[in-house]
Image (cartoon, rainbow, N blue to C red):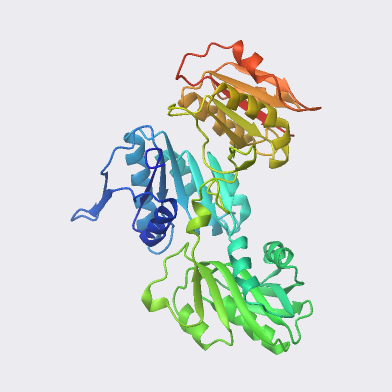
């Protein structure tokens, strides 16, 4: 694994980057970040990354502008150093809050920053718990949106709390809180509130039974803490027994920590997507690590790439990084599914590729639901000097058309609407396969 991937860090959260490397059992990539006397940022990569799979970990936390510029320059430096694939791991994408034009003459900054990241050299984005899920569609490359739901739910389930209710702090967060409620198998409630300004909110009513219950309030982030205080105040007026808070991002700006200390809250549980300096720590704040979640190995419980699967020695598919055989630096075949449920259809193809000793990857994309991902895969196949793309889908012509429109490579369509994808050995025998040269990308779309 040391020779295959490299993990680098900016100044935003080096502790998380080191934890990820410790989990993977690899050293943290060496780089130098400094500033000239005129405040210009200088970045130098201090080791060879040619044809490597590179990850750059940098949350857009305070100072946001500094961390963003560092990330952009580091992405460009890695591209100039001929990295094979560059993944920007952004645990906290703060500009996800700027997702719409809800006032005249303003910028949709979430889209602007997404474009800058791709322009700088990111071929893939990995982020966690976006404030607005639609921001995932802003990126012009493959973007994987992870959720901290499993981590937070595992923690609260181990507390052994009784008579619990999952609470959404507002109606817009009900869907997110509903995922927690389902996983914990507890009821759901939400608060009807109105935001007066960026720092002030007004809670009007609680929808759901919370009287004499232990309430666990789930949110995506805690910034100033004003919204949290209004939530706690409203809950106390309805006679709750105890209050816990779970959030992915503990930003804690301004007087947030002091407000938490003074609030009638038992615990505030956050993750380390945003660094928590010593001056912001207190007995009520618990921080969980996402290191094993953002960068896992194929046998780990959580995976860094939920859209990539591989076939292990026991014949089971599981999430993980690229699965390669032999000494090839890149796969000969990339199998792209419409959803995880299509795995049975591609199993014969994967088993055949294994028998032939052909390195391959399995990814997820859909010509209908996620055409931008199919486009990114087509472009990536061309960049990686893949020789042939095979589109196997229920509507193979549609998927093949999307792929062909964004690559100069030959595209072959194989319909698999009623059955599995087999005969891969016969298919590949019709294609010239120079030893050690990438040959085919297989797209399987369950649309």
Query: How many marks do you count on the picture?
Result: 0
Quadrant of the rendered structure where residue 430 is? Answer: top right
**Residue 300 coordinates in the image, percent (x, y):** 55, 51
Residue at the right extreme of this rendering: 418
Out of 427 and 379, give the one closest to the viewer: 427
State the residue at coordinates (38%, 72%): 277
In the rendered view, would you say 338 is above or below 296? above
- Report whether 436 appears left or right of 145: left
Residue 107 appears in the figure: no
Q: Quadrant of residue 247?
A: bottom right
- Quarter of the image with the N terminus is top left
From the top left corner, tell me how far across and down residue 256 is, in percent. 48, 78
Q: Nearer the viewer, residue 108 or 170?
A: 170
Residue 128 lies, in percent from the top left, at 54, 56
Which residue is pictured at 58% across the width and 81% down the height?
229
**Is 359 left, or right, of 133 in this rendering?**
left
At a point 47% along the width and 38% down the height, the residue shown is: 123
Question: Can the viewer see residue 350 in this picture?
Answer: yes
Residue 84 percent coordinates (x, y): 41, 33
């Amino acid at each position: 694994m040391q020779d295959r991937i490299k993990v680098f860090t900016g100044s935003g959260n080096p502790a998380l980057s080191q934890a990820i490397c410790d989990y993977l059992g690899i050293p943290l990539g060496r780089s130098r970040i400094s500033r000239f006397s005129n405040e210009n940022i200088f970045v130098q990569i201090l080791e060879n990354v040619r044809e490597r799979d590179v990850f750059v970990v940098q949350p857009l936390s305070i100072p946001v502008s500094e961390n963003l510029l560092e990330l952009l320059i580091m992405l460009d430096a890695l591209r100039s150093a001929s990295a094979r694939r560059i993944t920007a791991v952004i645990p906290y994408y703060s500009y996800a809050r700027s997702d719409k034009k809800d006032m005249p003459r303003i910028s949709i900054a979430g889209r602007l920053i997404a474009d800058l990241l791709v322009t700088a050299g990111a071929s893939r984005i990995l982020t966690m718990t976006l404030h607005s899920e639609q921001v995932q569609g802003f990126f012009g490359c493959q973007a994987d949106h992870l959720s901290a739901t499993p981590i937070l739910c595992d923690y609260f389930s181990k507390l052994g709390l009784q008579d619990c209710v999952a609470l959404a702090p507002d109606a817009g967060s009900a869907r997110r809180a509903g995922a927690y409620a389902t996983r914990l198998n507890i009821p759901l409630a939400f608060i009807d509130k109105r935001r007066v300004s960026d720092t002030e909110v007004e809670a009007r009513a609680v929808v759901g039974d919370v009287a004499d219950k232990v309430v666990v309030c789930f949110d995506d982030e805690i910034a100033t803490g004003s919204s949290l205080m209004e939530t706690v105040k409203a809950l106390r007026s309805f006679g709750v027994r105890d209050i816990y808070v779970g959030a992915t991002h503990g930003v804690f700006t301004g007087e947030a920590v002091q407000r938490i200390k003074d609030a009638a809250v038992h615990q505030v549980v956050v993750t380390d997507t945003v660094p928590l300096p010593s001056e912001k720590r207190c007995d009520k704040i618990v921080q969980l690590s996402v290191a094993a979640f953002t960068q896992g190995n194929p046998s780990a419980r959580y995976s860094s790439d939920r859209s990539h699967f591989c076939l292990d020695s026991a014949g089971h598919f599981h999430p993980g990084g690229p699965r390669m055989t032999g000494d090839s630096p890149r796969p000969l075949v990339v199998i792209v599914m419409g959803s995880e449920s299509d795995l049975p259809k591609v199993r014969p193809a994967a088993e055949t590729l294994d028998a032939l000793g052909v390195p391959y990857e399995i990814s997820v994309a859909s010509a209908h639901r996620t055409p931008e991902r199919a486009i990114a895969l087509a472009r990536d196949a061309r960049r990686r000097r893949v020789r042939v793309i095979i589109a196997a889908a229920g509507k193979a012509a549609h998927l093949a058309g999307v792929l062909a429109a964004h690559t100069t490579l030959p595209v072959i369509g194989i319909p698999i609407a009623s059955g599995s994808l087999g005969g891969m050995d016969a298919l590949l025998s019709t294609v010239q396969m120079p030893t050690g040269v990438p040959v085919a990308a297989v797209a399987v779309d369950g649309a």
